[in-house]
Image (spheres, grey):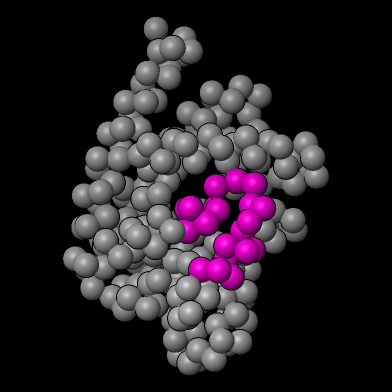
């Protein structure tokens, strides 16, 4: 089994009980998007695949302890890759991509690989899958608050008294701002179609819930 598949198995095991939408299906969609973007934009495929597979590996710790899953993920990724005998420069490159991937932190990507990882992760918050993920994530965050008291301070709209209002607020704060924060032209083309789907859905939701008369 090669390094990529060992990494995939390592991540799948950690995220097996992940209650929101940073699960292995999200990880593999981000990996696929990284490779799609790389075909047009360039970048090191090994760095991209490792960074994509490991980028959310710290999310379980964030749910348990608060803090920043990008920082946790970079630490966990470093320990894992070094234990696999990966060259230190490659480890540094991968963990740098992970550390800057998170939308809410607004950190600037320093390499083409980091730019592509940011774009791929953000694209998976758009379109039909983005709507699905946001609703599942809202439910999971509300459940975590009631079960163990964990509150994610970067996702306060998830706890709105009216979930529809919370969802609409989320859409305006994140998905509809993603286009202006994409790095590559390839990602922008993909985003345009996905955002059309989201605007259509939100318009219908507002009509059916009486928010738009």
Residue at left offset 26%, top offset 62%: 37
Could you tell me if residue 98 is visible in this image?
no
Residue 36 spot, x, y in % from top left: 27, 61
Residue 71 spot, x, y in % from top left: 60, 69
Indicate whether 95 appears above or below 176. below
Residue at left offset 55%, top offset 47%: 21
Residue 151 sits inside the magenta stretch: no
Residue at the top extreme of this rendering: 213
Instruction: Please give left or right for residue 165 compared with residue 207 in the image.
Output: right
What span is in magenta? 8-27
Residue 69 spot, x, y in % from top left: 61, 62
Q: Picture quarter containing residue 41?
A: bottom left
Check the picture and name the quadrant holding the C terminus.
top left
Could you tell me if residue 184 is visible in this image?
yes
Residue at left offset 61%, top offset 22%: 162
Closest to the observer, 185 or 50 = 50
């Amino acid at each position: 089994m090669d390094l990529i598949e060992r990494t995939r198995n390592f991540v799948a095991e950690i995220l097996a009980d992940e209650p929101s939408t940073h699960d292995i299906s999200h990880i593999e969609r981000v990996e696929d998007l990284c490779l799609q973007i790389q075909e047009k934009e360039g970048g090191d495929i090994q760095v991209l695949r490792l960074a994509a597979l490991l980028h959310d590996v710290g999310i379980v710790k964030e749910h348990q302890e608060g803090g920043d899953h990008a920082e946790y993920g970079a630490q966990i990724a470093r320990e894992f890759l070094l234990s696999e005998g990966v060259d230190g420069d490659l480890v540094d490159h991968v963990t740098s991509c992970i550390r800057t991937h998170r939308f809410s932190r607004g950190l600037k990507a320093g390499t083409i690989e980091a730019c592509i990882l940011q774009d791929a992760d953000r694209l998976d918050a758009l379109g039909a899958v983005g709507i699905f993920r946001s609703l599942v994530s809202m439910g999971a965050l509300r459940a975590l608050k009631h079960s163990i008291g964990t509150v994610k301070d970067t996702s306060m709209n998830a706890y709105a008294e009216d979930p529809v209002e919370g969802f609409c607020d989320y859409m305006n704060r994140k998905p509809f701002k993603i286009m202006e924060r994409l790095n590559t032209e390839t990602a922008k083309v993909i985003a345009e179609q996905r955002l059309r789907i989201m605007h259509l859905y939100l318009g219908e939701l507002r009509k059916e819930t009486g928010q738009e008369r």
